[in-house]
């Protein structure tokens, strides 16, 4: 099983180099099924996932590699780098969703001569809850 795992891992590396990321992930999966602690393959799959903008999956692979080999400093650096990218991606998604919600709210409130900008939300630092007030 070890030799077959290495074969899939090496072929996955070739697929990453030729930007065939889906095929690389497939071979990484096969390799890791045979050898679940193959750190190099975890890192290859992490790279392929990142290239496909699957940041959460890339982060999970890097975390798995770091957990399997805590002295592998590259994995630790990748975990920290990918955590920042995932956080930024989530913030961007959150901003997009709130922007769309605001546009929807404005389209409805516009019928009444109001706007979402008339509403102010203030967070209570002690409880984390919000107080919403209308300002004309």
Image (spheres, rainbow, N blue to C red):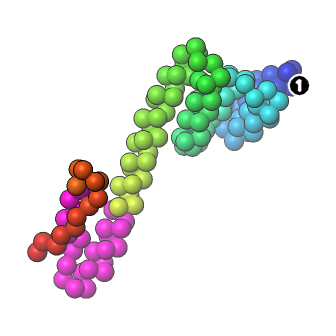
- Which quadrant, please, contains the C terminus? bottom left
Which residue is labeled 1 in the image?
1
x then y, percent, for residue 74: 54, 18
- Name the residue furthest right: 1
x then y, percent, for residue 20: 68, 37
For the residue pair 97 and 131, the one nearer the viewer reads as 131
In the image, residue 101 above or below residue 52 = below
- Which quadrant, please, contains the N terminus? top right
In the image, residue 48 above or below residue 70 = below
In the image, taking residue 24 as reference, residue 30 lies left or right, namely right
In the image, taking residue 4 as reference, residue 135 lies left or right, namely left
Instruction: Report if residue 108 lies within the magenta region.
Output: yes
Q: Which residues are magenta?
A: 99-123
Image point (24%, 50%), residue name = 126
Image point (39%, 61%), residue name = 97
Question: Under tag 1, what secondary structure?
Answer: loop
In the image, taking residue 80 as reference, residue 112 lies left or right, namely left
- Name the residue furthest front: 126
Q: Is residue 88 visible?
A: yes
x then y, percent, for residue 36: 75, 29
Dot 1 crowding, Cα within 10 Å, few <14, some 14–19, many 20+? few
The answer to which quarter of the image holds residue 25 is: top right
Image point (73%, 23%), residue name = 38
Instruction: Report if residue 100 lies within the magenta region.
Output: yes
The answer to which quarter of the image holds residue 61 is: top right
Total count of labels: 1
Q: Main secondary structure of the magenta part?
A: helix
For the residue pair 122 and 77, the one nearer the viewer reads as 122
In the image, residue 35 above or below residue 95 = above
x then y, percent, for residue 41: 70, 26
Q: Is residue 7 visible?
A: no
Image point (31%, 80%), residue name = 108
């Amino acid at each position: 099983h070890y030799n077959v795992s290495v074969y899939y891992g090496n072929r996955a590396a070739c697929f990453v180099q030729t930007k065939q990321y889906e095929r690389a992930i497939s071979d990484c999966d096969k390799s890791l099924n045979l050898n679940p602690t193959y750190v190099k393959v975890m890192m290859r799959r992490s790279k392929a996932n990142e290239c496909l903008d699957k940041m959460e999956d890339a982060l999970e692979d890097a975390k798995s590699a770091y957990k399997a080999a805590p002295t592998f400093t590259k994995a630790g650096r990748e975990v920290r780098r990918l955590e920042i990218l995932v956080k930024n991606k989530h913030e961007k998604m959150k901003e997009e969703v709130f922007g769309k919600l605001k546009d929807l709210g404005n389209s409805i409130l516009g019928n009444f001569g109001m706007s979402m900008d008339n509403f102010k939300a203030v967070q209570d630092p002690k409880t984390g809850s919000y107080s919403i007030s209308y300002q004309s």
